[in-house]
Image (tube, rainbow, N blue to C red):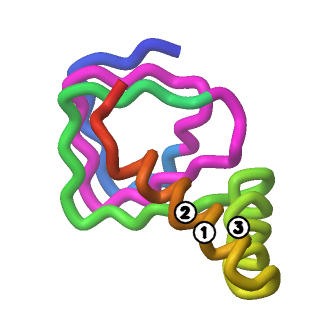
Amino acid sequence: MEIKNRTFTDSRQVVDGNRYHDCTFVRCQIVYCGGEVPHIVGCSFDQCAWQFDEAAQRTLQFMHLLYHGTGDAGRELIEQTLQLIRGPAQ
């Protein structure tokens, strides 16, 4: 769904698959469940909480286990992943 120039206030927004352009989120709960990656361009977030549910949450739990449970190789893999995240936007 394409959403432009809207303001969301005090609401729960599941962002999977949506395209947000120039929207404002105020005191919202922003939820990503691990589905289609949302596109978020030119939006602002004021006092929002971010949440990962379902597949997204399981992925983070798996990454945590890799980092803490597989020794140097697991930590190295997760650190490399974080470097990709910190790199330039694509």
Which residue in the structure is indicated by mark 2? 51
Q: Residue at x 53, y 57 (%)?
A: 80
In the image, is 10 to the left or to the right of 46? right
Q: Which residue is mark 3?
A: 63
Q: For the residue labelled by badge 1, is the local secondary structure a helix, a strand or a loop?
A: helix
* Magenta-highlighted residues: 14-36
- Of residue 75 and residue 26, the one placed in the foreground of this image is 75
Position of 16 compared to 86: left or right? Answer: right
Q: Quadrant of residue 69?
A: bottom right
Mark 2: amino acid: Gln
Residue 66 percent location from the top left of the image: 76, 73
Q: Earlier in the sequence, mark 1 or mark 2?
A: 2
Where residue 65 appears, x then y in whole percent? 77, 78
| Label 2, residues with CA under 10 Å away: few <14, some 14-19, many ≥20 | few
Task: Locate residue 27: give its quadrant.
Answer: bottom left
Q: Residues within 10 Å of mark 3 (few under 14, many from 20)?
A: some
- Magenta stretch: residue 21 in it? yes
Q: Secondary structure at mark 3?
A: helix
User: Of callouts 3 and 2, which one flags the residue occurring earlier in the amino acid sequence?
Assistant: 2
Give the residue at the far front of this rendering.
Answer: 72
- Residue denoted by label 1: 76
